[in-house]
Amino acid sequence: MPLRPTSKKQFDLSAYLSTRSRAVDQAMNRFLPSASTRPATIHKAMRYSIFAGGKRMRPALCLAAAEACGGKIEPALPLACAVECIHTYSLIHDDLPAMDNDDFRRGKPTSHKVFGEGMAILAGDALLTQAFEIAALSKGWPRYNHQTITLEIAKAAGSLQLIAGQVADLEGEGKKVSAAQLKYIHERKTSALLCCSARLGGMSANCTAAQLKALTDFGYNVGLAFQVIDDILDITQTTEQLGKTAGKDTAAQKATYPSIVGLEKSRKIATDLTNRAFAALKIFKGKAVALEALAEYLLKRDK
Amino acid sequence: MPLRPTSKKQFDLSAYLSTRSRAVDQAMNRFLPSASTRPATIHKAMRYSIFAGGKRMRPALCLAAAEACGGKIEPALPLACAVECIHTYSLIHDDLPAMDNDDFRRGKPTSHKVFGEGMAILAGDALLTQAFEIAALSKGWPRYNHQTITLEIAKAAGSLQLIAGQVADLEGEGKKVSAAQLKYIHERKTSALLCCSARLGGMSANCTAAQLKALTDFGYNVGLAFQVIDDILDITQTTEQLGKTAGKDTAAQKATYPSIVGLEKSRKIATDLTNRAFAALKIFKGKAVALEALAEYLLKRDK
């Protein structure tokens, strides 16, 4: 098992996540058009997926990164909400019949099951667009202006990162995929946005270049660990436990870490990645306790 | 017929559009990842739709607006390419089976017919994301920084404008739509992005508030005229003449200007709107000759 470098037994991650989630939800409620704003259907659809009970892991990483750099959560909130909009849009589109064809997400019917395919496509488009608007409503910082912030999000979400991961995932179905190819997919499909979340948090605290580098290493490794764990949970947990269809990677003949290197080695890889993430946090000298707790939680989670 | 206020008989719009299109194509080629960049399929799909022979009307409006304000085209090019990416993404998604279900666009098979539905959805997503990246690569101007530019695009493309128009259009199919509702759809589906194109061009020339107001009025009226003409052409031209499926509004029981107010009144509305667009250009004292010629061309076009 990995050793958390800062052994702060008193840190209550559950309370931390709860207060941060509430702050994110309140900010999101302010940033999104109300459900009655014309045309109401699209705003209902956007809100349905945003408030469908997501774990808010990316916003939490963003806010915890800001705090590790001595920043406050208030200026980081637009960036935290922006990454959550990107994440949610990608789930809505991934769940479509033309992609993963999934009927459930977070224990609820997916967007296209509730609003129809056309509206689900538009709700995803709207959330992607809204992400850039919300991020642009941030105040901007001496080291990181709005140009830097927009480029950071566009690159992480673009055709070389998030979308590249989805494309490679789609094209890899039913084919023999090597461990290297699988790492390529995971780096883009999951790690890119988690890494971006941590980096944006640092930027909102006007962090130094060294701090940004540390957050990048942390986010990259936590992101990969997160996806390895996702692969493991997909075969070890039930649909009820996950709140989304279990075993769908196997059903779709998708390459996963367990299918390539086995379950035991997969667990070791996730632990090693988490240890690397912990190591990256040394620079924060004990101030990154929330980031450490988050990394540990993501490793040990059961859904 | 409308009277173009600046009677510059020597202005050669065809030559103007040809040189501006070439500049836009060259810039777009630089901004987009090459077709061999991994994963190649998504970049091939993005380039397929971007280089499918579009008229480049929005980029032309953007560049002509910059020139009307005394600016050069070079600094306006990232913004011109950004609006074209937004326009192209919206066409790819509109053409999907879950939306308008169209097999042809600009005389070529639509993205999902060539690359499949999943990849077409992702290509649209990628172009929308790329639009914000390209716009952020612009240099920024004293009166209009990157925050302003990003917000301008996000608002025009978002759930209150471009996407709102598409939603209302989708929801209006087969229903009785009033002239007021139709105007609401056209303002958002077409006018918003044309207006944004002209405004961004002005911003790239660091235009005054009065010039920006004039470009807004111009873009709004030209945008509405453009869509009224589109409705007229849909029923008066053939599929071969248009390069896209003719008569599809009627087939989809979509409300159009001709279906609500008749063909003759529709033509008068388009002419009146174009005259209003001309009137907005007075402030430029004869320097907006390219914008005038564009507005006249859009009114008189036959495809």
Image (tube, coloured by chain):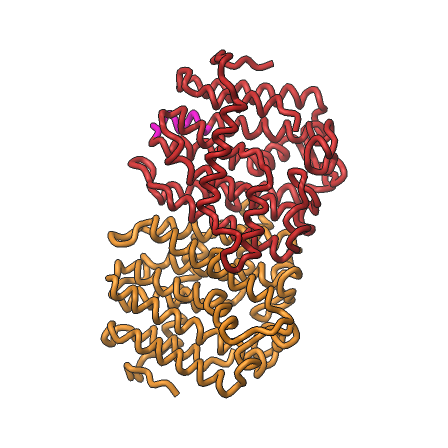
Chain colours: A orange, B red
B100 horizontally vs A124: left or right:
right
B131 horizontally vs A105: left or right:
left
Q: Visible in this render: residue A153?
A: yes
Q: Residue at x 65, y 29 (%)?
A: B303
Residue A290 at x, y percent in the picture: 33, 74
Q: Residue at x 60, y 64 (%)?
A: A171
Is residue B98 located in the magenta-colored stretch of the structure? no
Q: Nearer the viewer, residue A258 or A49?
A: A258
Q: Residue at x 51, y 12 (%)?
A: B9
Q: Nearer the viewer, residue B291 or A287?
A: B291
Which quarter of the figure has residue B236? top right
Is residue B212 located in the magenta-colored stretch of the structure? yes
B115 horizontally vs B283: left or right:
right
Q: Is residue B271 above or below residue A77?
A: above
Residue B12 at x, y percent in the picture: 51, 19
Which quarter of the figure has residue B246? top right
Q: Residue at x 47, y 46 (%)?
A: B131
Q: Visible in this render: residue A85?
A: no
Which quarter of the figure has residue A111? bottom right
Magenta segment range? B207-216
Q: Quadrant of the N terminus of chain B?
A: top right
Residue A57 at x, y percent in the picture: 43, 69
